[in-house]
Image (spheres, grey):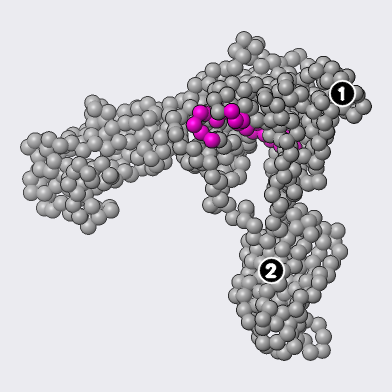
Amino acid sequence: MKNIICNTFIFICMVLINNAFAKRITLQGINKRSMTNHEVRDLPKASDGKGVMVTPGKPLTINFCLRVQSKVHLNNLRFSNFNTSALFRVSLDHGKWMGTYFAPPGDSYNNFINTGRFPKQHEFESGWHVLKINVSETSSPIALDQIEFDVFDDYITENILNCETICIPNGNFPVKNLQLTSQATMGTILQRSEPTKCAEVDNINIALFHPYISEFSITASLPQYQSFSNRKDEDLSNCPHLSHIVWKFNHFRPQPGMQVLRDKDSSLLVTNGNGQDRKGKHIVVLFYLEGLSKGSIDSRIGSHLFLRFKSLNSRTLVNLKYREANGSMTESAEKVYDSSTLEHMWKIPDFTWREHVENYLILSVESQSNEDFEIDELRMEKRPMVADSVETIYRSDDVIIEAVFVEFWWLAPESMTVTLTNGKKTKNVAYIRFYRPLPWNGGYAQVLVLYQDGNIRLLPVAPEGVDWIPFGTSVIVGQPRTDSNRPYVNIQEVVIDPERWQMGLLYKDGSSVRMKINCTYSETQLFVNDLYFTKDAFTNPFLTIRSMFVSEGNNDVDSIKIDNKHSRHIMDNFGSIQGRSFSFFRRCISKHLTLSPDIQVDIARTSFRPTFVPLAHRHFARQVRRMMERSPIKKLETDFQTWL
C-alpha cells in the first residue's frame, strides 16, 4: 500500500513538473483544409461554434510545426459522438501512437467530451509534423472541436504550432578562418538585452569582450531559412515614442482650479491671469523629454506648438513663454485670434529643451470679453526634418562611396570627416555608404553603411531578380560610451582607400581600428585589425551587437550560436558565454525585414598584450592626422598604404 501511495505521489509530482515547463497551445479542428475535405456542422457548444466531422475510413490530418527539437504531449482532445459508441486512434507522423480512445454512445453532437491527457509523450525534431485521427470502421463518426498540445519549448507560439510561422532546424555557421580562430583565445559575450513591443527599437544589446583581441571578422549572409518574401517596410505599431507628436490636449475649457490634464509625460493646469480685469488666463504645460541618455533627439530638436480654439466671439491675444535649456525665460511673439482665425503655430528652436528636468511653457490668453472659450486642441510636435542630402565622394567601376548629411543627427553637433587617399576631404558627415557592382545587370548594390556613432550595417549583394534587400542587425565596432542606454562610439575621422576597399577609423577618444571589406556572391565580410583602444579592454567591449526582437516571427534575430555548436534563444537570460565564433540568426521566418542578413562574428587572432595602449596610440593617432593634413597626395597614398 505504501509503495502504491509513493508511486502515485511520484507520478503526480512528475506531471506537475512537466506541466510547469510545458507551454499549452490549442489548435482548432476547423481549418481551410478540413473545411474543404470534411463535413462541418454548426454546433453552438463548440469553442468556435463549429465542429469538423471525422468518419470511418476518412481520417482527419492536422499539420503542426515545432521551433526546436521538443517533447510533445497531447493534453486533451475535445470531441462529441451521437447514437453509437466511438472508437478512434491518434498518431503522430504516420506511426507514433499517442493513444486510443473509446466513448459510449452520446445523446447529441452538441455535447462535447474531453479525453484528458493522452498516455504517450514523444520527442520531435523541429519543423513540420502531422497528427492523424483514425475512426474505427465500427465506430460512429465524431465531431472534433479542438486539440490541446503541451510543448516543452518556452518560445513556441500558436503561429508556429499551426505552421503560420515556419522555423528551420539549427542553422549551420562554420567558423571562418578556422586555422587562425582555433589558435585564438576565447572571448565573452554579455547579455544586456531587454524586451520591447516596438519593432523599430534595437532592444537586443549583446557586448563582446576580449582584452587581447587583435583581429576579427564580421560576416553578413542571407538568412538560412527559405523565403521569397522580401518584406522591408518599417512597422511603427506599438511605437508611440516614435510619433512626431510630443504631447496634445483636446477639447477643454480653461478654468482656474480645473482638474489637471495629463498626456504621456506631460500635464496641463490653468491659473488666473494678472491685471485688474482678471480676464486673462495662464495655461501651463509641464513635460519631460528623453534625450541623449535614452538615445533620443526629443529634448534636443526644436518644436512646433499649435493652439486651436473651437470658436471665438471676440479678439483674443495669446502670448507664449517658455524656459530654455540655460534656465532663462523666453517670450515669443504674440498671436492674435478672432472668429475667422482660430489656429496659430509657434516655432521653438533646436536645443531649447532639456533632458532629466521638467520643461515648461506658459500660454497667456486674454480676450476683450469674459466669454468662456473652449480650446479644440493644444499640441506640441517635433519640428519636421529636412530630408538627408547625399554626395557621391568616389565613383569607379569597382566601388561607389556616398557621404550622407543628416540635418539633425542624434549626436549633433558631432559629425565625422571622411578623407580619401586622393586627398579629397568631406566634413560634417553623419554616415557613409559603400556600393559594389553587380555583374549580371550593370548596376550596384549597397553592401555597407558606417555611421558616425559606430554602427556598421552589412549586406550581402542582393540576389539576382531582387531590387534590394534591407539591413537588419548592426554591429558597433569600438568601446561604447557609457552615458546612454543606446550604445555608441564617436568616430572623428574615416580614412578610405577606395580601390582597395580599406579604411581606418579614428575615434574622438583617441582609439583607432583599420578595416578591409570583401564581397562575394554569397556574403560580405569586414575584417578588422590593428585595434588600439584608450579605455580598459578588460571592462569595455570591443564590439556590440544591436538588433530587434519583439516575438517569434517578428524580429531581426531570434537565436545565437556559439562556435557552430550550441544555440541559445536571443532573449535567454544566459548572462555570459565564452567562445570564438558567434552567429546571430533567425530560426523562424520573420515578417519584419524578412531577407535582412544573418551576422557572424569570428575572433581570428589574439595577442599576449591588451589592446589598451592609450599613450602609444595617442602618438600614433596624431601622426596619422598630421599625415592626412600635411602630406602631398603621392606621399599620402604611400603613407596610407603603409598604415593599412
Give the extent of the magenta segment: 442-467
Q: Upstream in the sequence, badge 1 or badge 2?
A: 2
Q: Is residue 403 above or below residue 387?
A: above
Examine the rendering and report whether any part of residue 496 can be seen: yes
Residue 426: percent from left, percent from top: 81, 36
Give the amino acid type for the residue marked by disc 1 in the picture. Answer: Ile
Residue at x 78%, y 56% (from the top left corner): 350
In the picture of the structure, the residue carrying the numbered disc 1 is 633
| 240 left or right, relative to 6 | right
Q: Quick one: SS at disc 1?
A: helix
Residue at x 64%, y 57% (from the top left corner): 244
Q: Quadrant of the N terminus?
A: top left
Crowd rating for badge 2 (residues with CA inside 10 Å; few <14, some 14–19, many 20+): some
**Is residue 320 magenta-colored?**
no
Residue at x 74%, y 43% (from the top left corner): 405
Residue 212: percent from left, percent from top: 74, 19
Residue 50: percent from left, percent from top: 23, 52
Along the line of sight, the residue nearer the viewer: 34 or 67: 34
In the picture of the structure, the residue carrying the numbered disc 2 is 306
Crowd rating for badge 1 (residues with CA inside 10 Å; few <14, some 14–19, many 20+): some
